[in-house]
Amino acid sequence: MKWNYKIDNDTQILYFLSQARYTTTNQLARLFFTSSVRAETAIRRANFALQSLKKAGLVSHLKRRIGGARRGSASYVWQITFKGLKFLKNQDETVVLRYKNKYEPTQHHVEHTLAITEIFVETLETVRNSEKLSLEIFSFEPNSWRSYQKLSGIGRTLKPDAYLELVNHDYEDHYFLEIDRSTESLARVVNTCKKYIEYYRSGIEQRQKEVFPYVLWVVPDDKRKLAILKAIQKELYNFWELFTVITLEEYPDYIKGGILNEPEESR
């Protein structure tokens, strides 16, 4: 998605929720109410807007909260309703209608989706605070996915958590993003990397974009970063250079071009 400043805040919130699926009040406050001097004021304004949209039946929140009930309305996890999607579709025919699942999503799914949302929020915050960066594209799932065929002819789908394009002065950077929360085994991480290698070998992205995106793993801490780096260097041979592993804390500086790929221990 690209940021559209020409539509009102409520519609921007709905459009964002249609793409991101889940977001917290705090994340929405950081995205849409940055004119507030204090974070608490931004959260109050975000909550007021969300309650108004909820009364109109355009959004709802999950029963489960992030951080517990003591955090109040700031801990709600919000999603767009079918009515909200229909409202958007009346303005934009490209909006895809989908019905809400009867059951609440699992905690793992919600937390992973919120982690992807957080990457978008941090991307936009970094762009806003930079004089040289501009955001061209941020695609959430499933818009980030890529279809291709293996050399055997079998059809496959690569499923990045997100796809990002940034312009840095005269240069354009492309990224496939994988958000790791230390919940998957290293073997599964390596297998995911092998799917990227298959897609790289297909040449589809290179023909369409004239470049293959960086595959950027964003991880919680340095321990996990080092473990993944060692695993992919050991298992992926010459292809390991397709992959970069950074911590969430390093992410803003990385997309500005400010950190190296690997820690001293992995050299």
Image (cartoon, grey):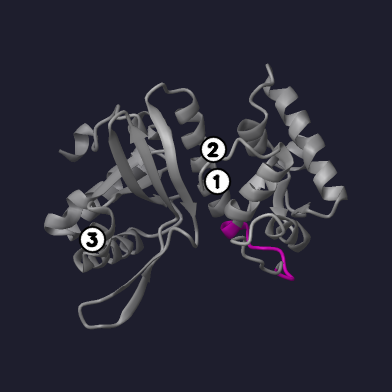
Quadrant where the image shows the C terminus: top left
Q: Position of residue 162 (x, y in %)?
A: 44, 52
Please indicate, yes or no, whether residue 72 appears anywhere in the rendered image: no
Confirm whether the magenta stretch covers residue 242.
no
* View extreme (left): residue: 238
CA distance separating discs 1 and 3: 29 Å
Q: Which quarter of the picture shows residue 132? A: top left
CA distance separating discs 1 and 2: 6 Å
Mark nearer the N terminus (2 vs 3): 2
Name the disc covering residue 121, or none.
2
Per the image, label 3 sits on a secondary structure element best described as helix
Please tell me whether mark 1 or mark 3 is closer to you in this view: 3
Q: Residue at x 16, y 56 (%)?
A: 239
Left or right: 115 as drawn, with respect to 255 = right
Q: Which residue is mark 1?
A: 117
Q: Position of residue 210 (x, y in %)?
A: 22, 53
User: Please, what is the three-letter code of the amino acid marked with disc 3?
Assistant: Arg
User: Please, what is the three-letter code of the amino acid marked with disc 2?
Assistant: Val
Q: Residues within 10 Å of mark 3 (few under 14, many from 20)?
A: few
Name the disc covering residue 207, or none.
3
- State the extent of the magenta-drawn residues as a range: 101-109
